[in-house]
Image (cartoon, rainbow, N blue to C red):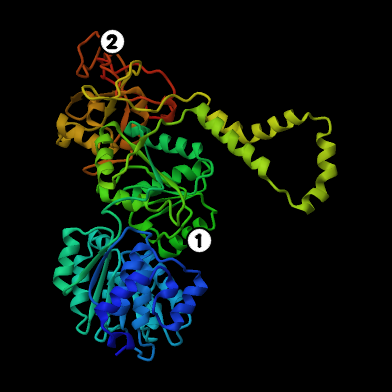
Amino acid sequence: MHPLRRIGEHNLYKFFLMLMNSFSSFPMREELMQAISDLGFETPTPIQLKVIPQLLAEPIDIIGLAQTGTGKTAAYGLPLLHHVDVSVKHVQCLVLSPTRELCMQIQEEMSKYGTHMRGLRVCAVYGGVPISGQIREVKAHPQVIVATPGRLIDLLERKAISLEHLQYVVLDEADEMLNMGFREDIDLILKNTPAREHTWLFSATMSNEVRGIAKRFMKDWKEFSVAAANSTNENIDHQYYVANHHNRFETLRRLLDFTPGIYGIIFTRTKQDAQEVSEKLMKMGYPTSPLHGDMDQKMRSKVMERFKSKALQCIVATDVAARGIDVNDITHVINYELPDDPEVYTHRSGRTARAGKSGICMSIVSPKQISNIRQIERLVKQKFHKSDIPDGAEIVRKKMFFYMEQIATAAPQADFAKLYKDSIHDQFAEVDKDELIRKLIWLQLKDTIEIYQHTEDLNAGYDRKEGPDRRSGNRFVRLFINLGEKDGLNEQKLLQFIIESTDVEANTIERMTVRDMSSFFNVPGDAAEYIIEHLSNKKFKGRKVRLEEAEQRSFGGGGGESRGSGRAKPQGARFSGDVRSYGGGRDRDGGGSGGGGYKGKRK
């Protein structure tokens, strides 16, 4: 028995809790204290201060509730290694994590903690890489294994690993593992740990599913929670920008240009969105990269290396992929779209304002999502600030001051000054200083000025009676689609297909006419290119969808409008913003009563 456990454990725990306000006061084995000193750990985080004394004095079953980035790895990792017997060559401790990135991160941190523990082996097993190499590592008799559920089960089924002597199980990010569908895997793994003495469960939230795991596999646990439930860092400035759905990407681009020094994460809801948004930004010259589950492990590791070295300003990530990101100086988090679960917002925003720094969390929302913002405000107990989407002049001005600051604070190397001083002086001897500065700034800003010199307002208004922004002057376009009644469509089914394929709002589509083999409908002119682009890449029941602008005639095929009207009478535009963001930039006539024919293919 460990010497500390011979003392009155309950009283000892209380005594520790009163005294411990620094890592140096934790009664841990000498090797761990040396590692803590090497790592520069001084003051424990709230979850560490609550959990570590308990697990050192009396390693009972516990539940630790704390947000991502609050030091949970050390909270369980240090006590875990404190109780490990390095002379025993079988698996004593298992840490389950939801993602490969987090798995690798935990293994790295645990190895740092145990760097002075001779004979300690910490092994990580996860999917996305060949299993043969991991089998060799497991057979080298590690005392601690960090694993994703799926890969661990693969190893169990191959009889490459035994959990018969396992004493400690840690479920890290338990809520996320359950959200990802690992409940049955967790059940199977825990049922195969007959010698398990203690289970330590760590989670950002205490859902019914998490509590269900605790009831089935834990005994007389103690619960430790830090801060108010679901509260967020007070150093985070929460901002939201209201834009119509089809203007989301252009809004994102403006926000990036308006924050030239950004170092952040852009969150999307799906892997496809992460890939598409990132590819668009990269083509425009932004130093970004995607990070999602469809990328192999080598590629994801390379992205994280580039991000941590700041070769990338931003990564575009899904919530699951971002679980393994451990970077303290992220300045911005951008929600390209709000998450379905408001609690996920706290995970996202918690990626910034770490280690006592401040940060900004921006959310791009449609007018109908303002109620979602109010819901999140109540959840995190903080007020969000509605901000205007910057216009072109604001972006140019912001970048100008950014570049001027860079020039003013630049410190050229001494060798550079010596080598090129005369050449520089000869070249610009006749140039006025103010003119030279203007030239330098112009070289930096000319591309930005060209992009933004004719932009329009992207801010979407909201009228409770009318719905999303109904501004005058936005003419309607009539579109042809090669689907009709023979495809099993009526107006309602066609409308549903369009909405699901493009994410536009239902009241964007007007005056639908469904015929035998084709259909027509009206859309606001500034959304036409967007809808054509997104629908033209789709298939419906195996048929490739063709979508084109209908020919506007006051005679012929009927198209669903009264004959002779010439053009549809707009009923208030539902889209606002920059027509050029769709590549059109033209004033278009609205959908006419015609529709008997349609224009040729888009060039």
Instruction: Residue 54 in the image: state x and y as whole percent.
Output: 29, 74
| Neighbours of disc 2 within 10 Å: few (<14), some (14-19), many (20+) | some
Placement of 289 over or under 66, stated as above or below? above
Q: Is residue 22 left or right of residue 227?
A: right
Residue at 77 percent across and 50 percent down: it is 416
Whether residue 125 is visible to the viewer of this picture, yes or no, is no
Residue at 79 percent across and 30 percent down: it is 431
Which residue type does callout 1 highlight?
Answer: Glu
Residue at 42 percent across and 38 percent down: it is 252
Placement of 519 over or under 87, stated as above or below? above
Which residue type does callout 2 highlight?
Answer: Gly
Q: Residue furthest top?
A: 564
Camera-side residue of 253 and 110 = 110
Kindly indicate the quadrant of the structure image that contains residue 519.
top left
Numbered disc total = 2
Q: Which mark is residue 566?
A: 2
Alpha-carbon span between mark 2 and mark 1: 60 Å
Placement of 84 over or under 387, stated as above or below? below
Kindly indicate the quadrant of the structure image that contains residue 450.
top right
Instruction: Residue 556 in the image: state x and y as whole percent.
Output: 24, 14
For the N terminus, the quadrant is: bottom left
Residue that mark 1 sits on? 305
**Labels 2 and 1: the sequence-earlier one:** 1
**Element type at mark 1:** helix
